[in-house]
Image: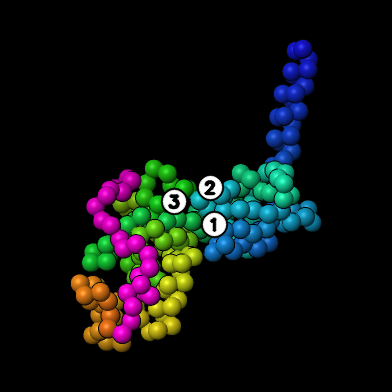
Amino acid sequence: FWLKWFKKGWNREWNRVVAMLTGTVKSYNPHKGWGFIECNGQDTFVNKKDLKGHCPSKGNQVKFQITQTEKGAQATNVEVLVSEEEQSYFGEIKGFNPSKGYGFIACEAFPDKDIFVLKSELPGGFGPQGGLCKFKVSQEDKGPSAKDVMLLGSAGNQVQQMKAMGYGWGKGDWGKGSYGKGWDWGKGGFPGYGYDMWMPMQMPVWGKGFKGW
């Protein structure tokens, strides 16, 4: 009995050790949340949920384990092997105050602290609550601050639509050209354009509290 138990434990530990591999990110789509890692001539699927809040880029070196699923081999326990300055992360905009020009991003890689973000780091100064994003982090005196923010999914699509129509952020209002035609929130939107076309996502909610601040 003890010999059998020892063999099982030893085999389990051995499998855990040999399963740790080092590979290169062959491709990764942050909008779709998946990609492939190349290792020893084989491509292994990697999903966003196995990245612990990190967002790899093509060419990044990674350390990972392989788990066999019904659809084939999949990378798990992935660690992106780049410097802190080059590291990118997945996050969700937890809150954004347009009048104050800053907000916070929640990220799995920073479970104890929300990431501060300035309007100037957001595409068009646009920060919809609940919007998914990719970003880098710099360590400031008061804590981590988001840099080079890219909005993903529906939030990213919305920004692209606004850019195509010539809209941007200016003086606290959504406007066009000289910002003279800002949004009239109290009356349901910009004349000639539907409110739902531009703001399908939930508007920011402020004052619910942010971790670490």
Q: Which residue is mark 3?
A: 107
Image spot of residue 98 (x, y percent): 27, 66
| Disc 2 element | loop
Image spot of residue 64 (x, y percent): 66, 46
- Is 202 in the magenta? yes
- The residues bearing labels 2 and 3 have C-alpha atoms spaced at a distance of 9 Å
Residue found at the very far top of the displayed protein: 1
User: Which mark is on residue 52?
Assistant: 2
Q: Could you tell me which residue is drawn at 42 percent across and 72 percent down?
A: 158
Residue 211 visible in the snapshot: yes
- The disc, 1 or 3, on the residue closer to the chain's N-terminal end is 1
> Which residues lie in the magenta part?
192-213
- Is 70 in the magenta? no
Above or below, comparing residue 5 to residue 89 in the picture: above
**Kind of residue indicated by mark 1:** Cys
- The residues bearing labels 1 and 2 have C-alpha atoms spaced at a distance of 9 Å
Pick whichever, 143 or 170, lies toward us: 170
Q: Could you tell me which residue is drawn at 53 percent across and 53 percent down?
A: 54
Image spot of residue 135 (x, y percent): 46, 61
User: Which mark is on residue 55?
Assistant: 1
* Majority SS type along the magenta span: loop
